[in-house]
Image: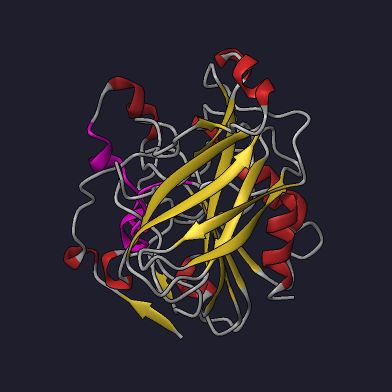
């Protein structure tokens, strides 16, 4: 079961800011010293670390978090100089999620970092309330509060778990559709052999990765394509695997061309304001998992286990 939509009816993306590619993520971090610990007063600014959102939180960029279904929000620990902290991290960070109504619930942000250079802490939650949510954590003897917006489902054009996949034109080796580069990986990956339309009609689970590995210039976006190559090794006969690039002519990016004109059809059809994104669908074309912004080998394997 899939949804066919016309690109002619899709609205243009008013903002395009790939992860850490344009401006920094919106933050609402309030740090306060604990009066019960006198050593806090001796902590210098250079020793402080803070949690930072790694997703569109609705404060600078339109939110991608919606009510009514499970959502994932990755956070990163940064040092005072703005560089992500990658060593000596805890296995998880506990905190409290405050809802717009004033209700609160305890949460634990588990650490993920298998196969990627920069570990992240993941908040997984379901909220039935629209509005400003506040995550409060205590780390390094500092109380930190990070705010983000959860919006109505119809405000976000992303497919959600339980939705049918959407058919979009994706170039293949046999039909490049005018794309100058089907894969910006240093050696093109093998996931450009089947169209999305055919994949969603052959009664086989489908994995769609939307990413541009050749233009990943931050340690946070991670080697998503390499993780996928490892995860599906030996499984090619039982699943459809498709890698879709973000730009039709990536070499024009450095020439100052309008990025909007270079976007691949799949980006618009799937309502993407970021990359990478990995979407896992069952044999009926129903979405079972979606991993956005960043993910590691463990999360990827968990997603694939839903269709095995």
What colour scheme was applied to this rendering of the protein?
A: secondary structure
For residue 265, side relative to residue 144 (left or right): left
Q: Which residues are magenta?
A: 258-275
User: In the visual, does 216 lie left or right of 204?
Assistant: left
Q: Does 104 appear above or below 192? A: below
| Place of residue 186 in the rendered image (x, y in percent of width and height, measured from the top left) | 62, 31
Q: Is residue 272 magenta?
A: yes
- Residue at x 45%, y 70% (from the top left corner): 127
Residue at the (33%, 28%) spot, across then down? 252
Direction right: furthest residue: 234
* Residue 147 x %, y %: 40, 48
Q: Position of residue 123 (x, y in %)?
A: 58, 56
In the picture, measured across the screen, residue 58 lies left or right of residue 227, that is: left
Residue 57 or residue 249, whichever sits in front: 57
Q: Is residue 277 above or below residue 9?
A: above
Residue at image point 52% right, 48% down: 136
């Amino acid at each position: 079961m899939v949804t066919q939509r016309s690109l002619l009816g899709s609205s243009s993306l008013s903002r395009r800011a790939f992860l850490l590619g344009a401006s920094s993520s919106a933050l609402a971090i309030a740090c306060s010293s604990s009066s019960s610990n006198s050593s806090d007063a001796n902590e210098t600014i250079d020793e402080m670390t803070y949690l930072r959102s790694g997703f569109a939180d609705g404060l600078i960029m339109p939110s991608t978090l919606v009510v009514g279904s499970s959502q994932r929000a990755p956070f990163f620990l940064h040092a005072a100089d703005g560089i992500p902290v990658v060593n000596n991290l805890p296995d998880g960070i506990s905190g409290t999620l405050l809802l717009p109504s004033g209700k609160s619930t305890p949460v634990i942000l588990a650490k993920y970092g298998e196969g990627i250079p920069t570990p992240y802490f993941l908040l997984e939650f379901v909220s039935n309330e629209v509005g400003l949510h506040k995550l409060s954590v205590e780390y390094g003897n500092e109380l930190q509060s990070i705010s983000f917006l959860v919006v109505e489902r119809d405000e976000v054009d992303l497919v959600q778990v339980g939705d049918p996949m959407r058919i979009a034109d994706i170039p293949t080796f046999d039909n490049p559709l005018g794309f100058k580069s089907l894969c910006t990986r240093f050696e093109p990956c093998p996931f450009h052999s089947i169209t999305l339309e055919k994949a969603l009609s052959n009664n086989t689970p489908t994995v769609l990765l939307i990413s541009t590995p050749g233009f990943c210039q931050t340690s946070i976006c991670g080697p998503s394509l390499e993780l996928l190559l490892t995860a599906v090794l030996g499984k090619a006969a039982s699943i459809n695997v498709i890698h879709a690039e973000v730009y039709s002519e990536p070499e024009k990016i450095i020439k100052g061309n309008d990025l909007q004109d270079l976007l691949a059809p799949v980006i618009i059809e799937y309502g993407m304001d970021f990359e990478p994104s990995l979407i896992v669908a069952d044999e009926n074309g129903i979405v079972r998992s979606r991993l956005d912004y960043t993910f590691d080998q463990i999360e990827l394997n968990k997603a694939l286990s839903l269709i095995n």
